[in-house]
Image (cartoon, coloured by chain):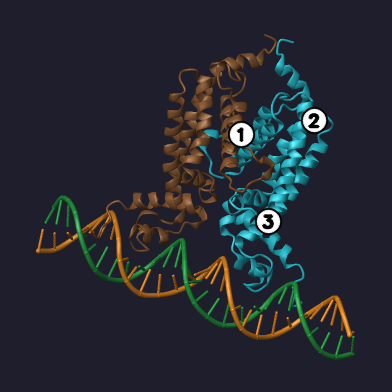
Chain colours: A brown, B cyan, C orange, D green
Amino acid sequence: MTYHHGNLKQALLDRAAEVIADQGIEALSLRALARDVGVSHAAPARHFRDKKALLSALATEGYLRFSAYVTNAAEQAGSDPVARYNAMGRSVIRFALTYPAYYATFNHPDVTQQADEDLLKSHKEYMEIVLMAAAEAQAAGWQPDIDPLVLMAFSSAAAAGAANLVTNRRGSDIFEGRDMEELAAQIINLVVPPSSQLCVEKRSPST
Amino acid sequence: MTYHHGNLKQALLDRAAEVIADQGIEALSLRALARDVGVSHAAPARHFRDKKALLSALATEGYLRFSAYVTNAAEQAGSDPVARYNAMGRSVIRFALTYPAYYATFNHPDVTQQADEDLLKSHKEYMEIVLMAAAEAQAAGWQPDIDPLVLMAFSSAAAAGAANLVTNRRGSDIFEGRDMEELAAQIINLVVPPSSQLCVEKRSPST
DNA sequence: TCTTGATGTTGTCAATAGCAACATCGGAGC
DNA sequence: GCTCCGATGTTGCTATTGACAACATCAAGA
């Protein structure tokens, strides 16, 4: 074992993601992280000024993956821009379930209440991807009269809210017996129909 | 000053709300709370098993106020069920801005990942209020073909997402120069139109 | 070889959460 | 009025944690 770890920064981020995923974000401790990675308790300070910085870095990494994830979902969905946008919405839910650690950082006060330049950049990049996709869906007939930025905010808000619903372990028994993932998908469908065909139908139901 | 505080439990909750509102939920400490209220560091333990319990209690109180708040908003909005539901949505945003401390607890892991009986009850009560209002809006022509529970989840998700957008201090400069509160209102309008008139128009735009 | 900067270690401090033993109050029952 | 007792608050303690400072080690280039 060398004196230098070699890749401590990434090792810490990886381990942090694991810990958050199975013990919750509140259980995260820099010292425990250092122990787990086999390094002394002050070593993380070389890479992260403080705990917030680590969470921010994790969130930054999360948004990068998030961008890739939704982009990929759009590509898988084919060429209909509305179907693509719907698929992106569904992928938000899947992402939250697949990478709970990253998703948890997105909502953590240390991340939401502060600005770190890298974080802002990766977050903005994500939103721009969504914004462009929203504009394309509009061009294909979805909500043509609304400001694209408002539409993007609306979709993001709904998707984020749905993801929260699904990731909350507190079982609101009002949803007793429901498949929460299915519920989330239905929410997405209320935001954007699954195909542009349905946009047209919606606007002139008499046909 | 008496030996017994008299109303320590409520005093702690009130002070906690203040601290959260102006220093953030991460800055909350039971000991500081005890100091501020003029009581010894272990006194809070008599009323709250631990920090999570205090946050849960605060969230419970928050949901009770939340219920009253949206109910009041509906009453102020008149008799059109759709307009009432729209007003309730807007009131969610106002609530988040007016009582940031309560709103912050709603999204805190200690609250979202665990179940405390009182909390579940007050949260369920809130959701039932929204559910009933959604059903009434449906009866007045809003989204008549959708499962009311799905509609309720959709509206809640979108409203919560919009509220998060507005309460996040991290200025995503993609919204540069926007009035975030106005943006949130526009989001609500995409969920439910401001009056039942607009539902009909939406469904048959040819008229 | 010497220097330099990056990285990791050891030691330490203040703040905190949570526990236990004790003190004090105030009301219920006599 | 008195006593007991449970509820409430206090004091003292331990372990954990985040953060800092001084030092050690390594790699690479002058």
Circles 3 and 2 in contact, beta carbons < 8 Å: no
For marks 3 and 2, the one nearer the N-term is 3
Q: Amino acid at mark 2?
A: Pro
- Residue mark closest to the camera, 3 vs 1: 1
The chain that hosts pointer 2 is B
A135 or D20: which is nearer to us? A135
Left or right: where B82 falls relative to A95: right
**Dot 2 surroundings within 10 Å: few (below 14), some, or many (20 or more)?**
many
Q: Secondary structure at mark 3?
A: helix
Kindly indicate the quadrant of the structure image that contains residue B207. Answer: top right
Do the dots labelled 3 and 1 sit on one chain?
no
Residue B104, horizontal then vertical, whole percent: 62, 50
Q: Secondary structure at mark 2?
A: helix
Q: Residue at x 59, y 60 (%)?
A: B28
Judging by the rendered image, the residue that carries numbered circle 3 is: B58
Classify 10 Å Cα crowding around label 1: few (below 14), some (14-19), many (20 and above): many
| Residue A136: mark | none
- Give the camera-side residue of A86 and B191: A86
- Residue A183: give its label: 1
Q: Which residue is mark 2?
A: B81
| Residue A176 seen anywhere in this rendered image of the structure | yes
Q: Is residue B1 visible?
A: no
At x 53% / y 31%, what residue is drawn?
A90
Whether discs 3 and 2 lie on one chain: the answer is: yes
Instruction: Give left or right: position of A2 versus A54.
Output: left
Identity of the amino acid at label 3?
Answer: Leu
Question: Does residue B58 sit above or below A59 in this rendering?
Answer: below
Residue situated in front as seen by the camera: A163 or B100 = A163
The image quarter in which residue B23 lies: bottom right
Residues tagged 2 and 1 counted as in contact (Cβ below 8 A)? no
